[in-house]
Amino acid sequence: MLQLSKKILALAVVVALVAAGLFAYYAVLRLRSSEWEVSVVVDGRQKTFKLGDLEALAQRYNISGVGSVKAAPLLKLVQLAGYAGNTTLIRNLSAVGADGYSVKLDNAFLYLNKTYVVLAEGREAEWGPARLVVEGMSRKHWVKQLVRVEAGTGPWVLVLEVDNETRRVLGLDELRELAVELSGLGKAVPLSELLQLIGVSAQDVVSVEFVGADGYRVAWDRRHVPDAFVLLVAEPELERYGPLRGVVLSLSKKAWVHHLVAVNVLVRG
């Protein structure tokens, strides 16, 4: 009986120590959370967000690989830090955690619309008050205990992808050299010309996606390739449509994409 009492007492002590440890952990976490800041820098211009600021900007998102979480879109944060996004793109991005871990992304504009600052809730607390999550990318591109994000802008480009893999990146000057006059719309590059550049036959195309800087995507089948163009937007309409616009003359304007950043061609295996 004495032996059993000692075991019970020892177990009670262990439970008490664990409970005290958990209490201390979450007490420290709450303290750290109340003081936590995330700095967002765009081309050298810095804006600092306290945790309360992030919570005010956050909404609930169902993010693949994470689940339902409260998060602030990184696109919104870089906009608040000074990024306008009408004539330039976020070309590179780096994020740093309090433990020194960092990641870098090239052609970051392709991922910006699916990158979030996730706020700690329940089990998320183990990752720190704020965590950078890039949906669809491996966890090595995620940053726990996020404290800083740096973004650099550059000239607008068009990414040509084949089956979601980058095949070529074209600047505006290169596109102007390929452009023809499109009646009623202005200078535009035929999609058929772009297919030739990346070595894809129109007969092998299954479908094509136009992708906007905000993540908006429209897909259509190869029947419309002859009527598809990348329009070089004239100065008066840059703010509305961005430098590039994907148009398909045989489809309604719902299939047209403004602020075009990528053309993804899906081909037969």
Image: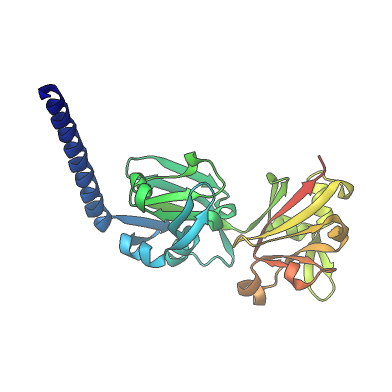
Residue projecting furthest to the front? 1
Residue at (21% x, 50% y) in the render:
27
Residue 183's spot in the image, x, y percent?
85, 73
Residue closer to the observer: 34 or 110: 34
Residue closer to the observer: 260 or 223: 223
Residue at (51% x, 56% y) in the render:
62
Residue 226's spot in the image, x, y percent?
88, 60
Residue projecting furthest to the top? 3
Residue 4, above or below 147:
above
Quarter location, residue 33: bottom left
Quadrant where the image shows the C terminus: top right
Residue at (85% x, 61% y) in the render:
224
Q: With 210 as the anchor, is 143 left or right in this view?
A: left
* Residue 11 visible in rendering: yes
Quadrant where the image shows the N terminus: top left
Q: With 89 as the anchor, is 70 left or right in this view?
A: left
Q: For the image shown, how many numbered marks are present on the structure? A: 0
Residue 176's spot in the image, x, y percent?
75, 60
Residue closer to the observer: 164 or 228: 164
Q: With 83 as the anchor, is 20 left or right in this view?
A: left
Quarter location, residue 101: top left
* Residue 44 visible in rendering: no
Residue projecting furthest to the left? 2
